[in-house]
Image (cartoon, helix red, strand yellow):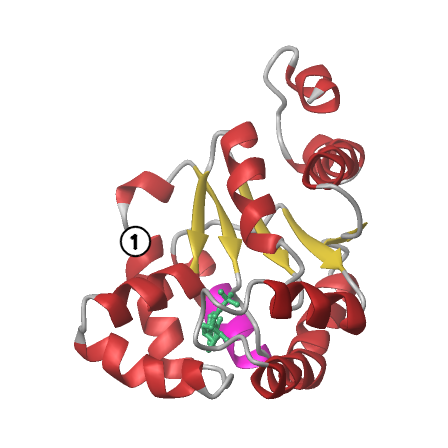
Amino acid sequence: MTRLLIIGPPGSGKGTQAQRLSAHLEIVPVSTGDIFRMNVLEQTVLGTEAQRHMDNGDLVPDHLTNDMVRQRLAMSDVRDGFLLDGYPRTLAQVAALDGMLDSSSQRLDGVLELAVSDEQVVQRLLARADNRSDDNEDVIRHRLDLYHEQTNAVLSEYAERGLLTRVDGLGSVNDITDRTLTALAMTTLPRHVEPARGRRSRLLRY
Ligand code: AMP
């Protein structure tokens, strides 16, 4: 059973890595950004409310985000493990997640930080700018500012708890996945998870 978080600035490639890592670890990826975008597309009440914040590069308010995650983590497919991508982003969300996990006697196995410099992030996001309404330069810089203001505190909190593994997010998609799985196998997984026979070498061979 593996419960992980992946945290990185917008444009760090965390969504791509979350998909690859969760496929490899056979756990379910849960991306709050994807859930919000789906709600926007389907024009749900949550989507309409979230869109205003997303389009400005702001965070969706904690109570809406926490309620959404609480509902998602109550579903049966994540009972045996998940990789949360994009949550928690604030200390209030950390506290909410603690409460959700405590109430079902669960705990986190580890937190991955995908580290990428601001300039790298801006270049990458501008390159994909046609695809998303929140990818113009002002909005990107604002999202980065928020990341530093709010999410650095989340990283410090998990570092203090001894849960944080930092991975360099620069390089090819394959290299980063490889690097991340190696870091997990060396830190998080042996400490917290009964590895299935051969699991560790499978991870390292990816
Ligand atoms: P992402 O795809 O993770 O970059 O998320 C896209 C946008 O969704 C963010 O810029 C926020 O507006 C919103 N969002 C995603 N996750 C959260 C969260 N944990 N808290 C607040 N807003 C979020």
Which residue is rendered at x = 59% and y = 17% of the image? 196
Foreground residue among 133 and 104: 133
Q: Was residue 170 drawn as part of the magenta stretch in this picture?
A: no
Type of amino acid at the residue the image marks with label 1: Ala
Judge whether 86 appears above or below 89 on screen: above
Decide if residue 163 is in sight here: yes
Q: Position of residue 25 (x, y in %)?
A: 55, 30
Q: What secondary structure is marked by label 1? A: loop
Residue beneath disc 1 = 74
Q: Position of residue 131 (x, y in %)?
A: 45, 64
Q: Residues within 10 Å of mark 1 (few under 14, many from 20)?
A: few
Q: Magenta span covers which residues?
A: 91-98
Judge whether 171 appears above or below 69 on screen: above
> Within the image, what quadrant is residue 49 found in?
bottom left
Which residue is rendered at x = 37% and y = 43% of the image? 78
Judge whether 5 appears above or below 174 on screen: below
Which quarter of the rendering shows the C terminus? top right
Q: Was residue 95 drawn as part of the magenta stretch in this picture?
A: yes
Q: Position of residue 34 (x, y in %)?
A: 39, 60
> Within the image, what quadrant is residue 124 found in?
bottom right
Foreground residue among 141 and 31: 141
Which secondary structure is most common in the magenta stretch? Answer: helix
Q: Is residue 197 left or right of residue 170?
A: left
Which residue is rendered at x = 41% and y = 86% of the image? 53
Please give the count of numbered marks on the rendered protein: 1
